[in-house]
Image (cartoon, grey):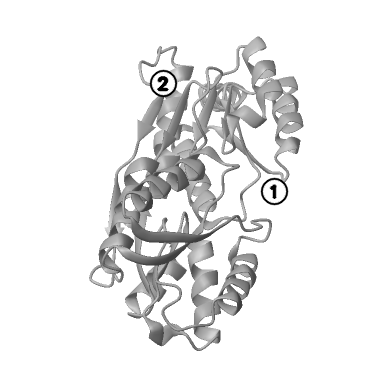
């Protein structure tokens, strides 16, 4: 009888635990990006340790669809929502979450009064470091191609900072400011756009560098430069993220010379920490939480 009672109590405890497990919706249109995949994996690992139920929702490049997915999460009465998208573009959904009393945390998103906190890397610092790297490598002169993406705040600010850095060098010309299609990850369209720029500037030395706000355009530009037989011109390429493919390219010692390693897993796990603090009733005093980064060159790309 005692054994049966103990088993029954244990079963009830497990059911109660499952019933009270926090539910979190993670919503992004950018799951095709390696960095976003890493954020999500870091968040899921930290959430699993806490026993949360996590539903990852990818709208496959459709930013507008994020609004309805947030509204769905509100109807499902989740305990928290995590977004990886420009908050300014999904305000209606954020308002629905606010009205329902559901906290929203940004995971490399952007700041907004309806977002409790945004966990990210310091985009200002990353952009400054890579733009200064380019300026120094080309001795402060020459034509630079920039790959940017102004539709997403964490990337948009990188372009703004790089513009300011290059504008401080009178002999650096921004030859083109390209926004690639990122629906397939960004490499293919960046390659096509770089091929067109190379064709329009055929003279050796006409392009000194490529500054990319993240690694996918840098990789696409590298492919275009190599396929055009222009790798020997010494065109300097930099990116941001230091994803595995970028690290391999940098370690090879070619045109792709530097990137910035973000702690993607750390961003995800820190976002989970922030969610936990909110669910515990803590009132956050910071609206932006930065996770450290590191410059990656051929000297440390294999680490």
Q: Label 2 crowding class (10 Å Cα cut-off): few <14, some 14-19, many 20+?
A: few
Residue 135 place in picture, x, y as percent: 30, 61
Question: Helix, strand, or loop for circle 1?
Answer: loop
Residue drawn at (37%, 53%), measured in percent from left and top?
166
The C terminus: image quadrant: bottom left
Q: Which mark is residue 184?
A: none
Q: Which residue is mark 1?
A: 61
Within the image, what quadrant is residue 188 found in?
bottom right
Within the image, what quadrant is residue 49 found in?
top left
For this view, does 60 lie left or right of residue 221? Answer: right
Q: CA distance from mark 2 to mark 1?
A: 30 Å
Residue 69 place in picture, x, y as percent: 73, 32
Q: Nearer the viewer, residue 215 or 147?
A: 147
Q: Nearer the viewer, residue 223 or 235?
A: 235
Residue drawn at (67%, 61%), measured in percent from left and top?
184
Count numbered badges in the picture. 2
Judge whether 7 appears above or below 197 on screen: above
Q: Label 1 crowding class (10 Å Cα cut-off): few <14, some 14-19, many 20+?
A: some
Residue 156 place in picture, x, y as percent: 51, 43
Judge whether 68 appears above or below 227 on screen: above
Residue 6 place in picture, x, y as percent: 51, 24
The N terminus: image quadrant: top right
Question: Of the residues under marks 2 and 1, which one precedes in the sequence?
Answer: 1
Res. 303 in view: no
Judge whether 169 appears above or below 2 on screen: below
Residue drawn at (58%, 21%), measured in percent from left and top?
20
Within the image, what quadrant is residue 91 found in?
top right
Res. 291 in view: yes
Of the residues tagged 2 and 1, which is closer to the observer? 1
Q: Which residue is mark 2?
A: 277
Question: Helix, strand, or loop for circle 2?
Answer: helix
């Amino acid at each position: 009888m005692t054994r049966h009672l103990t088993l029954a109590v244990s079963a009830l405890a497990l059911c109660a635990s499952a019933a009270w497990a926090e539910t979190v919706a993670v919503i992004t249109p950018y799951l095709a990006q390696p960095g976003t995949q890493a954020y999500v994996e870091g968040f899921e690992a930290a959430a699993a340790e806490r026993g949360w139920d996590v539903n990852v929702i990818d709208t496959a490049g459709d930013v507008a669809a994020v609004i309805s997915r947030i509204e769905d999460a509100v109807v499902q009465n989740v305990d928290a929502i995590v977004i990886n998208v420009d908050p300014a573009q999904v305000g209606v959904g954020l308002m629905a979450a606010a009205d329902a009393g559901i906290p929203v945390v940004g995971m490399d998103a952007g700041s907004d009064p309806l977002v409790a906190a945004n966990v990210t890397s310091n985009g200002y610092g990353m952009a400054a470091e890579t733009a200064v790297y380019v300026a120094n490598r080309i001795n402060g002169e020459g034509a630079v191609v920039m790959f940017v993406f102004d539709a997403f705040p964490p990337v948009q600010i990188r372009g703004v900072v790089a513009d300011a850095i290059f504008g401080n060098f009178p002999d650096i010309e921004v030859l083109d400011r390209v926004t690639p299609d990122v629906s397939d990850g960004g490499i293919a369209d960046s390659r096509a756009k770089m091929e067109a720029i190379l064709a329009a500037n055929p003279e050796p030395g006409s392009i000194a560098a490529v500054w990319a706000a993240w690694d996918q355009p840098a990789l696409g530009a590298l492919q275009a430069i190599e396929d055009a037989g222009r790798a020997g011109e010494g065109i300097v390429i930099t990116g941001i993220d230091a994803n595995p493919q970028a690290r391999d390219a940098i370690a090879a010692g070619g045109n792709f010379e530097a990137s910035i390693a973000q702690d993607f897993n750390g961003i995800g796990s820190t976002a989970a920490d922030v969610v936990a603090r909110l669910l515990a009733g803590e009132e956050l005093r910071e609206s932006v939480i930065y996770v450290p980064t590191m410059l990656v060159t051929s000297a440390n790309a294999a680490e």
